[in-house]
Amino acid sequence: MRSYVFVSCNVNVFVSNDDIISSQDVTSLATHLPAYTRVWAKQLETETDETDDDRRLGGYGFYSHKQKALTHSHWVEQVISAGSFGGHDTQASEASHKTNMGLASRRVRHGRGNVTQKNMQEYLRFHTLCLELKSLHNTRQVRAKPRRSTPRIKQGVTQLLYELHMGGDLTTVPVQQHFLHSELRIARVELLDMLCDKLGMTRTNTSYSQLQCLNWTFGQKLTRSNGVTYWATDSKYLSQPGSRRRDMFLIRGMEQVRGLNTAFCCEAVAFVEIDGFKTLCENRRRPLPTHLREHLVDDNTLRFVIGRWLTSHSTSLHRDSLHRPVCPGPLKLNHCLWTYAKTSRARKTMVTDTGNPSAAFNICRDMFGNDQSSCARRWEEEQRAYYALISTKTIISTVNIIREYVPFSDTLERSDVWLETVTVV
């Protein structure tokens, strides 16, 4: 059987002597090269069905898809390496089409003809090298671990206040009256009273003794399940010494202030995670109150914001759609006006019945300032501070708010007035 080789710019077409192809069916004029050598007499006919299942190629059926026609592309290097232009057996190159053409074409970036050819040859070089190394060294393929679609988020209270604990015996006066931290200037007994109010327990030593089964974790950073992060620190924001961030929260619910419904708003002082409520309920033989069950994290843990309440400023006479106190004057279009809420009487842990600093304050004076003037100023500012334990699941959003300076003062001291910007552009 004699064969002819039709060589175009990119395609070598091999047909038998019996096929008739007119020149008008070929896009470019092909050169007819007679084969000077005969193939092996027992050589089987090579067909496209052996290596290519795609029948949706263009062209005329009698030329492109006839039984003995091969319309695959071959690089010049392949043609030369497989034989010669004079006598060429196409079976070897046709059998490797799935690797040399199919696999290489799928794995490289396509561009212009020469660029694509270069990329495919570069891929085949490394592919062949890797196969040889694998056969020589008998390497074992290790399945790569699937990449996580999203990084794992560590939820809960972090950036812990180390060396801070509730103490051993919560029924003793020295433990109860000791303040927690320089950035959490609340006595332990005040925190116990707030938790007793949440649980519906009386503020007695018996209740304090029952609360000793709980584990308390204090921190300055809170990460929720959706990845949102809140901070409450004066010195370690993003673990940078001296950096401050205390988030302000709008809390679910409202109260009556001077006859107007007013939203809840607080300043984050710290975050606390308390676990062991299963043991507490078993010891008391009473379940948790209904309003706390829906706030449980894992049937045993509650997370709270230790917050300082804000309330509407006395000059605010109107409320917006979210019941926030509207700022009077020209700023009413986009601002609200808040101030620190105050307790009805001074805190017993800071002030005696005669109005003097308490013994607990004098013992923990170093937590309130480095000098006498700063201690005195904070004693005045915080003796009626209104703190609360607020469930983290009641947080609606953060508030864009800033504390105003003391008017007509050159000391740059901050006042108790907070100006909220409703819409930030």
Image: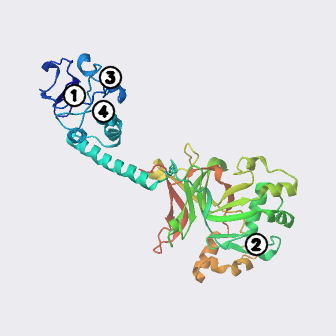
Along the viewing direction, whichever of 345 and 303 lies nearer the viewer: 303
Q: CA distance from mark 3 to mark 2?
A: 80 Å
Between 404 and 248, the residue placed more toward the observer is 248
Location of residue 265 (image quadrant): bottom right
* Mark positioned earlier in the residue sequence (1 or 4): 1
Spatial separation of the CA atoms under disc 1 and disc 4 = 13 Å
Badge 1 amino acid = Val
Tag 2 secondary structure = loop
Which type of secondary structure does the marked residue at label 4 adopt? Answer: helix
Q: Which badge, 4 or 3, comes first in the chain's sequence?
A: 3
Q: CA distance from mark 1 to mark 3?
A: 18 Å
Mark in front: 1 vs 4: 4
Give the residue drawn at x 47%, y 70%. Answer: 408
Task: Please state which amino acid type lies under the numbered disc 2.
Answer: Gly
Q: Residues within 10 Å of mark 3 (few under 14, many from 20)?
A: few
Q: Residues within 10 Å of mark 4 (few under 14, many from 20)?
A: some
N-terminal of the pair, mark 1 or mark 3, is 1
Residue type indicated by callout 3:
Arg
The residue tagged with tag 1: helix, strand or loop?
strand
The residue to which callout 1 is attached is 13
350 or 366: nearer the eye? 366
Q: Earlier in the sequence, mark 2 or mark 1?
A: 1
Mark 1 neighbour class, 10 Å CA radius: few under 14, some 14 to 19, many 20 or more: some
Whichever of callouts 3 and 2 sits on the residue coming sooner in the sequence is 3
Residue positioned 71% across, 51% down in the render: 298
Find the distance from the CA under tag 2 to the CA under tag 4.
85 Å
